[in-house]
Amino acid sequence: MDREYQTARVEDRGEGLLLLTLNRPEVANAMNTQMGRDLLVFFDEINAAPTQQRCIVLTGAGERAFCAGGDLKERNSMTDAAWQDQHLLFERMIRAFVGCPVPVIGAVNGAAYAGGCELALCCDFIYAAETARFALTEVTLGIMPGAGGTQNLPRAVGERRAKEIILTGRPFTAAEAYKWGMVNRICAPGRVVDEALETGRRIAENAPISVRQAKQAIHFGMQVDLASGMMLEIEAYNRMVPTEDRREGVLAFNEKRKPRFTGR
């Protein structure tokens, strides 16, 4: 699925693993209207045919930034109506991103500020370079997070820590993000994409129906009470029982070989 968008590029790394790169390095990969369109198209295509891919790694071009947030130069001359129209596009893109049944790993290679931090938080989990920095700076600009930040950050770091981060707008380091539970792994310089791809390949080797069902059970189970979550889990589990992959997995175990999963 190699593809070039105006503001992003997609590289097929084989066996259902994709590398999605935000590609505006000259402006720290800031998110303009076209990037919103490109990411919406990308995730809509993935969501329409999720069996075609097994894992996605999201990163930014260059070493300086993952994504600096919304492109404020583009927004500088916008009318209120134009601003709201653009944000509606961003909202649609974020819903498509969050609704993606295929796992997405964030490989944060540099600054992830404002909307860039929100993009990272939409990933299923995050690896970050040692030098990466994060911030939700919207209140310093007269707005507030509007791409899931007020919802995803508290779920990652807790309500009180999220309030401190969002209400001050103060940047924080990759080490702090790791300590607070927002980042899963800190990587040496130049290694974050490689390590995310290694993990992505490990995910892609597993039974794809199992991976998608487990992701959905975790995601939606976190939004309901425990009893409802347990019921949701069983419904997701029962989807695997009649599959060829379930039979292949058990057979491969007994034959002491690596399973060959086909997504059926």
Image: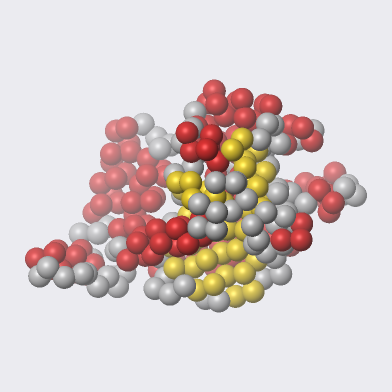
Q: Is 33 rendered above or below residue 252?
A: above
**Which percent across, then down, holds residue 223?**
43, 37
The residue lying toward the viewer, choosing from 218 and 135, is 135
Residue 144 at least partly seen? no
Q: Is residue 84 left or right of residue 168?
A: right
Q: How is the image coloured?
A: secondary structure
Looking at the image, which residue sits at the far top?
A: 160
Position of residue 264 measured from the top left corner of the image (x, y, whole percent): 29, 70
* Residue drawn at point x = 45 percent, y = 46 percent: 185
Residue 180, image x, y percentages: 49, 32
Query: Exactly how many numbered labels are in the figure?
Result: 0
In the image, 24: left or right of 82?
A: left
Camera sees residue 43: yes
256 relative to 154 in the view: left or right: left
| Image quadrant assignment for residue 247 | bottom left
The extreme right residue here reads 77
In this image, 70 relative to 56: left or right? right
Percent from the top left, x then y, of residue 96? 56, 55
| Rendering quarter of residue 232 | top left
Residue furthest left as drawn? 254
Residue at image position (23%, 67%) is 245
Residue ID at (54%, 23%): 160
Which residue is painted at 76% across and 35% down in the image?
Answer: 143
